[in-house]
């Protein structure tokens, strides 16, 4: 569902993303893992057509990010910490606004709202004003907004940042449920323990490069049961 080939982004003197190639299949959670500044956000923003690659390309659900950005957006959702939601609206109003972009209206909107609400447990959130919501509630709105159009590809960028234990648990459970629907997810994080829980395959990023890729089981074996140890070993050049 996602196929990146030599995907690259340069800023003045830096290769933020340096010839990245990887694939993510249906029903798979791919962990894009690495420390701050590794290039994870830049990669996801290119896949979401929010940022133009300097070189290389990628396909999302079979559509080229350079040539077919509208089709890509129709098939992809992104949950990104920087996204703002409208403070003066209720959860329901925010979602209605975004549903309009996808032509989801009337009865279809109500059905979709029920679907998303059941998936994310949003009963207490829909009629609340955004400005009165906790961080966890806001995050539910951000996720709901990203999946309203039921995209087959979902990108999550440091999606648990700032969440408490309950909201974090709900998010990780949601990731597994969304995968269970046969969708493809990229889970970007520097928190290795989260990746251990939800990812099927992992790619370690450092300095814009993919320095390791393998199934979670392979990576865990490399790190004697720990992804964090595997990452450090890989960077130190150990086997
Ligand atoms: N707009 C920009 N202009 C210049 N350099 C940038 C810009 N955006 C990102 N970079 C640089 O690109 C590199 C990769 O940044 P990126 O945000 O993709 O990393 P990341 O792995 O997502 O890290 P984090 O977890 O901190 O978000 C960093 O060196 C960063 O300083």
Image: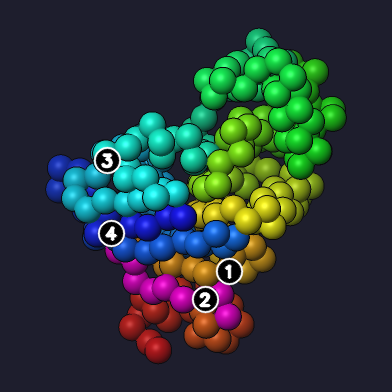
Tell me, yes or no, whether the two marked residues, 2 and 1, touch with CB atoms within 8 Å.
Answer: yes
Please tell me which of labels 1 and 4 falls first in the chain.
4
Please tell me which of labels 4 and 3 falls first in the chain.
4
Give the left or right position of residue 205, taking residue 16 as reference. Answer: right
Give the left or right position of residue 147, taking residue 16 as reference. Answer: right
Please tell me which of labels 3 and 2 falls first in the chain.
3
Query: Is label 2 in a helix, a strand or a loop?
Result: strand
Q: Nearer the viewer, residue 52 or 112?
A: 112
Tell me, yes or no, whether the two marked residues, 1 and 3, touch with CB atoms within 8 Å.
Answer: no
Q: Residues within 10 Å of mark 3 (few under 14, many from 20)?
A: some
In percent of the image, x 41 and y 63: which residue is there?
23
Q: Is residue 212 magenta?
A: yes
Instruction: State the residue position of label 1.
Output: 200
In percent of the image, x 72 and y 53: which residue is there?
177
Task: Find the distance from the CA under tag 3 to the CA under tag 2.
Answer: 29 Å
Q: Quadrant of residue 239?
A: bottom left
Q: Is residue 22 magenta?
A: no
Task: Find the distance from the CA under tag 4 to the CA under tag 3.
Answer: 12 Å
Please tell me which of labels 1 and 3 falls first in the chain.
3
């Amino acid at each position: 569902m996602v196929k990146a080939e030599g995907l690259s982004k340069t800023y003045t003197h830096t290769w933020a993303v340096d010839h990245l190639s990887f694939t993510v299949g249906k029903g798979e959670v791919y962990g894009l893992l690495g420390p701050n500044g590794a290039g994870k956000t830049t990669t996801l923003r290119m896949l979401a057509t929010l940022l133009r690659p300097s070189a290389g390309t990628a396909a999302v659900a079979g559509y080229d990010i350079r040539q077919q950005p509208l089709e890509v957006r129709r098939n992809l959702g992104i949950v990104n910490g920087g996204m703002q939601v409208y403070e003066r609206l209720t959860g329901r109003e925010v979602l209605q606004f975004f549903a309009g972009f996808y032509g989801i209206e009337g009865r279809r909107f109500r059905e979709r709202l029920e679907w998303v609400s059941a998936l994310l447990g949003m009963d207490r959130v829909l009629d609340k004003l955004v400005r009165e919501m906790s961080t966890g509630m806001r995050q539910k709105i951000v996720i709901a907004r990203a999946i309203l159009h039921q995209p087959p590809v979902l990108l999550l960028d440091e999606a648990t940042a700032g969440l408490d234990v309950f909201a974090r648990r709900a998010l990780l459970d949601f990731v597994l449920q969304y995968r269970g629907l046969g969708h493809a997810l990229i889970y970007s994080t520097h928190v290795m323990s989260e990746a251990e829980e939800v990812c099927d395959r992992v790619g370690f990023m450092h300095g814009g490069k993919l320095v390791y890729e393998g199934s979670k089981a392979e990576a865990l074996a490399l790190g004697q049961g720990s992804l964090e140890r595997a990452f450090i070993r890989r960077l130190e050049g150990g086997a």
